[in-house]
Amino acid sequence: MKIHCRKLNKIDYLNMRSLLIRDGVNNWNYITEESISTQFSLIDEGKASAVLAEVNEGEIIGFAVVIHSDAFPAKLAKYTDFSGIAYVKEVVVSKCQSGQGVGSKLLQECVRIARSRNAVKVFVERHEENAPSAGMMRKAGFEIIDTFYDPEKRTVGSRNTSVLAKCT
């Protein structure tokens, strides 16, 4: 398996969208067509990077999207200023690869990429009760900095979002 960042082609975007819809959508995640399109546009504009987990050339089994400081979500401004930060918007792993450390490796590569772009801190969010994401993020060294009620984004369980961060 290779974890890396590379230029994407049209087929990559189709495969990423398919993987995200097939294996990323669940009660804990907030995924919309608009958020997918926005992420892909940011990648095209160079404001975000796609980190891929591939087992064969072009066979994507997981990916993450790290958004660079020039496109950092305004809602997270209360935690930091916009200089020297990055935000991991998405981490998805094929269900057949789940629990094998792929997600943690994707997050670690996101941190490496953020560091190479002079980010000093990387942020990520998850549903408070999403145990698999919690484990993946903990293994990658992220720590919770806040948890808040988020009923528009979270429709099940506690309806809370946890914000996590890691220094690069």
Image (spheres, rainbow, N blue to C red):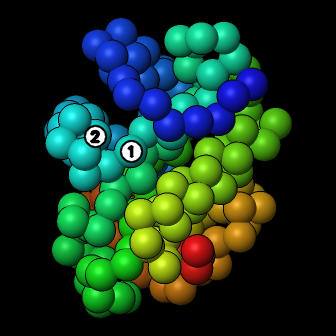
* Vertical arrangement, residue 137 with respect to residue 89, above or below: below
Determine whether, in the image, residue 7 is placed left or right of residue 103. left
Q: Disc 2 versus disc 1: distance between alpha carbons? A: 5 Å
Res. 15 in view: yes
Of residues 37 and 71, the one drawn nearer to the viewer in this rendering: 71
Query: What residue appears at the point 58 percent right and 36 percent down from the top-left corner?
Result: 4
- Which quarter shows the C terminus? bottom right
The image shows residue 55 at horizontal and vertical percentages of: 69, 17
Query: What residue appears at the point 43 percent right and 39 percent down from the top-left corner?
Result: 50
* Vertical arrangement, residue 74 with respect to residue 34, above or below: below
Helix, strand, or loop for circle 1?
A: strand
Of residues 45 and 89, the one drawn nearer to the viewer in this rendering: 45
Res 33 → quadrant: top left
User: What label sits on residue 154 in the rendered view?
Assistant: none
Res 97 → quadrant: top right
Crowding around mark 2 (Cα neighbors within 10 Å: few <14, some 14 to 19, many 20+) is some
Task: Read off the residue under disc 2.
Answer: 43
Task: Read off the residue under disc 1.
Answer: 49
Helix, strand, or loop for circle 2?
A: helix
Res. 94 in view: no
Looking at the rendered structure, the number of numbered marks drawn on it comes to: 2
Determine whether, in the image, residue 160 is placed left or right of residue 79. right
Label located before the other in sequence (2 or 1): 2
The image shows residue 52 at horizontal and vertical percentages of: 54, 32
What amino acid type should be assigned to the residue bearing mark 2? Ile
Query: What residue appears at the point 49 percent right and 85 percent down from the top-left corner?
Result: 146
Whether residues under marks 2 and 1 lie with C-beta atoms below 8 angstroms apart, the answer is: yes
* Vertical arrangement, residue 110 with respect to residue 52, above or below: below
